[in-house]
Amino acid sequence: MSDICLKDQLYEGYLFVYFIGESEEGEQVYFSLSQDGLHWKDLNNGKPVLKSSIGEMGVRDPFILRSPLDGKFNIIATDLRIASDKGWDVAQYSGSRSIIIWESIDLVHWSEESSFEIDIPDAGCVWAPESIYDEQSEEHLLFWASMTKRESTESKQIIYSSRTKDFKHFSKPECYIERKNHVIDTSIIKEGDVYYRFSKDETKKCIILEQSRSLSSQSFYDLESPVLDSMLGVEGPIVFKFNDRNEWCLMVDQFAANKGYLPLVTDDLSSGHFRVLNSEEYFLGDTKKRHGSILNLTRAEYDTLLGTMG
């Protein structure tokens, strides 16, 4: 299936893939559906759809993607279970260096989970893996945060990247984003010929917005966004385009206040202007949703998920 074929598909729904917290089964993969991107229905009776029984026996930050190369779906996630009382220091400095991966052809039937260990020997962790398809190289650009020293004397959270065509074989990791402050939770969306990159400044605890006309690590530059600069205590940015209009939704996980996701909308990503929605404008379902991702769905995909898991 070609990239052009995927672009031409008519999308009419949305799938939210996420974890729900540090409870016994909270760090697993949950699904919710929406017809408008703002009002959500939890699937599978609010129970996990996928569970990891390898590595740390739990996953966080699940990211779902549709590959233009073969039309398959993958979920990639952080191999981490805070519920086992390991603590955040251990998780950052001596945690798992593996990514947990699932594959599906229909969003309903999923492979057994597999893992891939990232080849950065001194990395203390591999957090929040995400991916975007690079049309120029016809590969998936995979990126994640790792606590490493590199050239400094102190460890710092840095975004690394790798490339893959099949989520089974990966190129050698390279530094992708290094800033003065710690940086984690990067997410990228393309609109027209421009890439917009959202990341969490892990020092300030706010979201950074950048843009570029290529995916090159050196080509991005910061965009001013007073709303995002002043919104502290958030992480796990999710950005997606609404199916029926030229408007985008940015979701941020209000981790500091323990409130789950908050939606913001804009009709121009390059402006840096976002409107925070009022609580009556959205409903995120019965479960509190933590760092995850959203996939635009066809009507057939939406109906199939609702019919099998609703």
Image: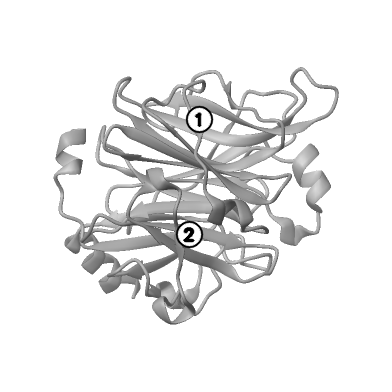
Which three-letter amino acid code belongs to the residue tagged 2? Answer: Met
Residue at x-position 58% and y-position 66%: 20
Q: Is residue 52 visible?
A: no
Query: In the image, is 1 to the left or to the right of 186?
Result: left
Task: Identify residue for label 2.
Answer: 251
Above or below, 80 relative to 135: below
Marks 1/2: CA–CA distance: 21 Å
Secondary structure found at label 1: strand
Residue 49 spot, x, y in % from top left: 45, 64
From the image, which quarter does the N terminus lie in? top left
Residue 238 spot, x, y in % from top left: 47, 53
Task: Identify residue for label 1.
Answer: 221
Name the one closer to the observer, 257 or 302.
Answer: 257
Residue 185 spot, x, y in % from top left: 58, 44
Query: In the image, is 34 to the left or to the right of 254?
Result: left
Q: Label 1 crowding class (10 Å Cα cut-off): few <14, some 14-19, many 20+? A: few
Q: Label 2 crowding class (10 Å Cα cut-off): few <14, some 14-19, many 20+? A: many
Name the one closer to the observer, 140 or 74.
Answer: 140
Query: In the image, is 243 to the left or to the right of 266?
Result: left
Which three-letter amino acid code belongs to the residue tagged 1? Answer: Tyr
Residue 13 spot, x, y in % from top left: 26, 63
Camera-nearest label, 1 or 2: 1
Residue at x-position 51% and y-position 20%: 218
Q: How is the image coloured?
A: one colour
Q: Is residue 281 visible?
A: yes
Above or below, 228 relative to 203: below
